[in-house]
Structure formats: C-alpha cells, structure tokens
Image (spheres, grey):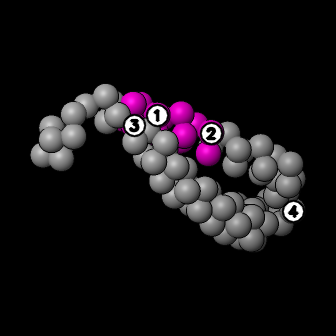
Amino acid sequence: MTATLVTGTGLLVLLGVLAGTLAGASVSSGLIDLQGHTSGVGAGIGRTPPAATLAVTMLVAVGAALLVALIPAHRAARSRVPLATR
C-alpha cells in the first residue's frame, strides 16, 4: 500500500516538475528582459539558470515530495481497510 501511494504521488510530481521546468525555462529569458525593460534598467539584467541548476532543483523537488508522501502512505498502510475506506 505504501509503495502504491508513493509511486502514484511520485509520478504526478514528476510530470508537474517536468512541465513546470520546461515552461519556466522557455519563458524565463523573455520575462527577465521584460522586467528590465519595464523598470527602466534595460534588457539583459539577468540570465536563465544553467541546466545543471535546473536538474538539481528538479531532483530536490521530486525527492522532497516523495519524502512528504511517505507520511500519509505509512499511516494508510497501518490502518485497517474497513476504517480507511470510510
């Protein structure tokens, strides 16, 4: 039961992190330039994060979500089935 709940959560988190990272990486340079332009500083005030930084951040996010998912999964595994289905 624990493995099923953590795996289900992990897959959802992995899909969300991948989609968010791809979307964020694709628009980040444009948003950085837009902020520089609207604040009067000019474009080029920042850079997008390197791929290694994004990869480490993704791993930390997925790992933290899996660790947090262990808490309710462990509780559900210890409970009795008729009580858990109510």
- Residue under label 1: 70
Q: What's the magenta bit mostly, secondary-structure-wise? A: helix
- Looking at the rendering, the stretch of residues picked out in magenta corresponds to 62-74
Residue 37 in view of the camera: no
- Residue under label 4: 44
Kindly report the distance in space between the C-alpha atoms of the residues bearing marks 4 and 3.
Answer: 46 Å
Say whether residue 64 is magenta.
yes
Three-letter amino acid code at the position of disc 1: Leu
Q: Is residue 31 left or right of residue 44?
A: left
Give the foreground label among 1 and 4.
1
Q: Is residue 19 left or right of residue 2?
A: right
Kindly report the distance in space between the C-alpha atoms of the residues bearing marks 1 and 4.
Answer: 43 Å
Which of the marked residues, 1 or 4, is nearer the chain's N terminus?
A: 4
Q: Is residue 24 left or right of residue 56?
A: left
Q: Dot 1 surroundings within 10 Å: few (below 14), some, or many (20 or more)?
A: some
The reply to whether callout 3 and callout 1 are in contact (CB within 8 Å) is yes
Kindly report the distance in space between the C-alpha atoms of the residues bearing marks 2 and 1.
Answer: 11 Å
Which secondary structure, mark 2? helix
Which of the marked residues, 2 or 1, is nearer the chain's N terminus?
A: 2
Q: Give whichever of 40, 49 is nearer the camera.
A: 49
Q: Give me the residue at 53% from left, 41% from top.
A: 65
Q: Give whichever of 24, 13 is nearer the camera.
A: 13
Kindly report the distance in space between the C-alpha atoms of the residues bearing marks 3 and 1.
Answer: 5 Å
Three-letter amino acid code at the position of disc 2: Gly
